[in-house]
């Protein structure tokens, strides 16, 4: 299959244009991020969802409580609502005897007032009757006929859930641009809200280029990695298919998917030999913002603005593709939507890491819990396509470009990309 | 609405049975967990899913690589495949001149052998031709007619991704009973697998009891909290509806849902006044394993084995319901499926916490990142129904029963239940 007259894919002439130039002049990661932040990007649409479908979405509205919930005191125990002053001297040897005037079942709205020497039977969650200021627990009392013997004194407010306990006027129930958690939804529910405005899921398109994928010489593991990595409670991926290594095919694939995406990632063709095609195809659809960044892995990354969507051209190798795109997508999502894409944590570095000066590096590590503390062991990932390292790892350490390394025992912060076992 | 002749819901007689007894003899959390571990429980079914639908599921099979992937060396750069020995003396001032014998496009399977003084143009990801042992980067070379000038020496293996780089024979691609992450799926894809055996989602049924919910005196925030908290990539919830406070209604609700669940949570009716009904209803369907555990919040929790499913009777108050059930469900899932239900991390405690001796306590805290380190500020949550604390918190600290507190500045491990902002 080797033929020096083969004009297939990239010509030697096209490649020669880059001869002795390559990526020698790489942009720093910080500069690349700042270019990226200056552009005008598509703002996401807001949609309304029932609360039950909203966990893990990003809120597009702020909700502040304008009332106290609940609006009356409630009992926090089963027992007897009473005036605490009546129980002042109650002891097991000398109980206080109170006349029981009735029962407040859960769901009742009591109107009767508790007076001196009386009490009302009450259940957890029931509204406290006026006049009462405490609840004696059932287990500290004894019923005899219509009388209740209280065997220990009760303080004012004891076993009472005060009005406004769930929400007070002015409480932020949900901030704008924040991830929605079950407790926010429970508070919204108790506040009487049924629907919520959230950002629709961020659509991330994935186009994989490469003749080796089309002819099945290799499986599209890069596509699988990106499509599953970028699927979350607030992101979806769109499969833009596998496309041949030529400018026209890439342009057609981009055109057909760009309006359905908020972010587009094109893999392959970012390396020196093929990049002209991808670059030309993407430049034809929009504006190139940068090409080549001093990051490891994935320094061949390029960014375009096409119809106000960020379009990344990244390596075809799976680990380089996911890590280099994540270095930007994470920041993009944080800027536009206000949330972090994945969980992070703090960990102790088990072995020194060296860094190539001037490069911002994503180092794969195996993080484990020991005695309630996280430790991270960096894994050897010399070549950026190395899937075996990433399946043994579960976390990423980001090393800033101004560091020549990080010494053993240092505290680092990690991005969690796999399971960390805790007992 | 107060009527001392009211026989609605719980009778005073039923309540009197518990007089002076209550929950005084609580089981320790550790003992409760051990009872729970001894029972026979329903083992989950395995289902087959396409890889793309498997992220976040739990694997039910182990997959070990029986081959090297890839099976031949590949180029890790664009450039020229050559014999490294030929470039031994190459410098910018004194380049080595090699005859270029052809091009290996991505996807080609080269058969030609690279001999002394020759090279073959190659692209990232292309299979290395026999005879070659290194790749000179395009940017360090110059093409002139059919000759390539190499301006710097290349070491053996340089810019080559060796065979077996993605997967080596014997590598574990995916462990049994482990959470499935994108990198596992990418490796399975490169290994040529399309479908995977995983556990079907764990179904968690939620039944909420209480007249106050039926007559809409309060919103069902507990149901909303539990249903969204127990929805994840590998768990689904089933809404068992709102049921009145009586034994027959509860029994009917349990019967109609139990066979669809792997775990069932019944809220309300776990407190002293109402618990007999729930207890009687659940005991009628299966076996009670414990009732009352020294945990905070939610000491009224009871566990039943009904048709080999764990059935929890918990408080009707939202925070107590979610935290007390989680103290057991987390452990149950870990034992049966081998995975942790939610993310955990290590953090520094900003303020001392006191603990009631003998109680295992879940303390809500606000965790934040500062200088790459996590800090946790405990929040005041005196009453277990307090939603306002849980919406201000994003994490839980578990305090062991043998501790009377944890001093400020200690390192604690946290369960992450909300957003922690990182820059």
Image (spheres, coloured by chain):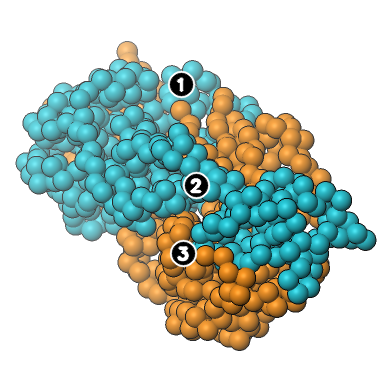
Chain colours: A cyan, B orange
Q: Is residue A169 visible?
A: yes
Dots 1 and 3 on the same chain: no
Q: Chain of mark 1?
A: A
Task: Measuring from the top left, give residue A128's x and y in whole percent.
Answer: 60, 54
Q: Chain of mark 2?
A: A
Task: Measuring from the top left, give residue A37's x and y in whole percent.
Answer: 29, 23
Q: Chain of mark 3?
A: B
Nearest to N terminus: mark 1 or mark 2? 2
Residue under label 1: A401
- How crowded pointer 3 is (Cα within 10 Å; few <14, some 14-19, many 20+) is rated as some
Residue under label 3: B213
Task: Measuring from the top left, give residue B144's x and y in whole percent.
Answer: 16, 24
Horizontal side, residue A413 vs residue B35: left or right: left
Q: Which residue is at the front of the view, A352 or A286?
A: A286
- How crowded pointer 2 is (Cα within 10 Å; few <14, some 14-19, many 20+) is rated as some
Task: Measuring from the top left, give residue A192's x and y in whole percent.
Answer: 38, 51
Vertically, is A413 above or below A79? above
Q: Residue furthest front?
A: A116
The numbered mark at residue A71 is 2
Q: Which residue is at the front of the view, A144 or A307?
A: A144
Seen at 16% across and 36% down, the residue is: A278
Q: Secondary structure at mark 3?
A: helix
Q: How many angstroms separate mark 1 from mark 3 (CA)?
A: 57 Å
């Amino acid at each position: 299959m080797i033929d020096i007259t083969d004009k297939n894919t990239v010509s030697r002439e096209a490649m020669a244009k880059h001869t002795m130039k390559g990526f020698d002049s790489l942009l720093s990661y910080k500069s690349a991020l700042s270019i990226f932040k200056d552009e005008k990007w598509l703002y996401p649409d807001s949609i309304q969802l029932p609360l039950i479908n909203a966990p893990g979405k990003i809120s597009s509205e702020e909700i502040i409580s304008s009332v106290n919930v609940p609006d009356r005191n409630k009992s926090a125990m089963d027992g007897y609502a009473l005036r605490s002053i009546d129980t002042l001297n109650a002891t097991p040897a000398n109980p206080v005897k109170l006349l029981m005037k009735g029962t407040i079942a859960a769901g009742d709205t009591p109107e009767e007032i508790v007076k001196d020497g009386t009490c009302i039977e009450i259940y957890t969650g029931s509204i406290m009757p006026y006049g009462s200021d405490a609840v004696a627990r059932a287990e500290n009392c004894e019923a005899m006929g219509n009388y209740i013997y209280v065997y220990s004194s009760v303080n004012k407010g004891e076993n009472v859930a005060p009005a406004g306990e769930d929400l007070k006027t002015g409480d932020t129930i949900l901030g704008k641009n924040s991830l929605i958690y079950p407790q926010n939804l429970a508070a919204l529910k108790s506040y009487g809200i049924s629907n919520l405005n959230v950002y629709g899921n961020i659509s991330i398109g994935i186009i994989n280029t490469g003749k080796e994928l089309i002819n099945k010489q290799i499986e599209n593991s890069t596509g699988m990695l990106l499509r599953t990595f970028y699927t979350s409670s607030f992101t979806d991926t769109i499969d833009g298919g596998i496309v041949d290594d030529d400018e026209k095919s890439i342009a057609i694939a981009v055109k057909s998917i760009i309006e359905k995406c908020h972010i587009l990632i094109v893999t392959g063709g970012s390396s020196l030999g093929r990049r002209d095609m991808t670059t030309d195809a993407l430049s034809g659809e929009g504006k190139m913002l940068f090409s080549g960044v001093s990051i490891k892995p994935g320094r061949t990354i390029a960014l375009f603005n096409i119809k106000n969507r960020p379009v990344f051209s990244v390596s075809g190798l799976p680990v380089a593709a996911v890590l280099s795109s994540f270095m930007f997508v994470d920041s993009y999502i944080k800027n536009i939507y206000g949330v972090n894409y994945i969980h992070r944590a703090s960990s102790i570095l088990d072995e020194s890491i060296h860094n190539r000066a001037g490069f911002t590096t994503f180092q794969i590590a195996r993080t484990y819990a020991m005695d309630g503390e996280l430790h991270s062991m960096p894994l050897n990932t010399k070549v950026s396509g190395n899937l075996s390292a990433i399946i043994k790892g579960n976390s990423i350490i980001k090393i800033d470009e101004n560091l020549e390394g990080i010494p053993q025992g240092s505290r680092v912060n990690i991005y969690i990309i796999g399971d960390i076992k805790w007992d």
